[in-house]
Image (cartoon, rainbow, N blue to C red):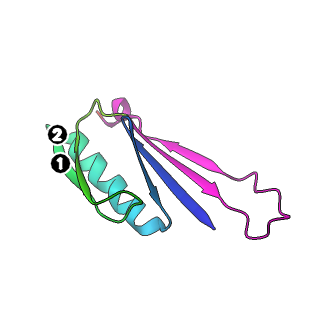
Amino acid sequence: MQVFHVYIDDLRFTFVDRAPVEELKSSVVKASRSDGDFIQITQSSRPPSEVFITAQTKVRIETATIPRDPGDGGSDDDDAFWFDFDSLN
């Protein structure tokens, strides 16, 4: 099972489904390319909220695999995704 941790500045949001994370990525990129905008986060472990995103907002998405079998030591294919807003200009 995969869990997605999204860090926006000092806030952490946890998702168990990839679809809302993909939607969030699109919203973050769109807001960062404009003069900044509020994005809604509704399907995370936190209560629904809005976060203001600009090109200077630090956003990190980590993907972790939770072993289904307690005897499984985990997976080495965990990955992390960093937005590099400087490359979007």
Q: In this view, does 63 lie to the left or right of 36?
A: right
Q: Compared to 1, does 51 lie above or below? A: above
* Residue 77 covered by magenta stretch: yes
Give the residue drawn at x 47%, y 66%: 18
| Count of numbered tags | 2
Out of 78 and 45, give the one closest to the viewer. Answer: 45
Q: Is residue 16 left or right of residue 44?
A: right
Q: Picture coordinates of residue 59 (x, y %)?
A: 39, 40
Q: Picture coordinates of residue 27 (x, y %)?
A: 27, 54
Q: Picture coordinates of residue 64 (x, y %)?
A: 62, 54
Mark 1 vs 2: CB contact within 8 A: no
Give the residue drawn at x 32%, y 37%: 88
Q: The disc labelled 1 sits on which kind of residue? A: Phe
Q: Is mark 2 on a helix, strand or loop?
A: loop
> How many angstroms separate mark 1 from mark 2 (CA)?
7 Å
Q: Give the range drawn in magenta.
A: 59-88
Q: Picture coordinates of residue 38 (x, y %)?
A: 17, 48
Give the residue drawn at x 28%, y 33%: 89
Q: What element carries label 1?
A: strand
Q: Is residue 57 left or right of residue 12?
A: left
Q: The disc labelled 2 sits on which kind of residue? A: Gly
Q: Quadrant of the N terminus?
A: bottom right
- Give the number of the disc on residue 36: 2
Q: Quadrant of residue 52?
A: top left
* Residue 87 covered by magenta stretch: yes
- Give the number of the disc on residue 86: none
Q: How crowded is mark 1: few (under 14 residues within 10 Å), some or many (20 or more)?
A: some
Residue sitting at the far right: 71
Give the residue drawn at x 51%, y 56%: 4
Q: Name the residue under label 1.
A: 38
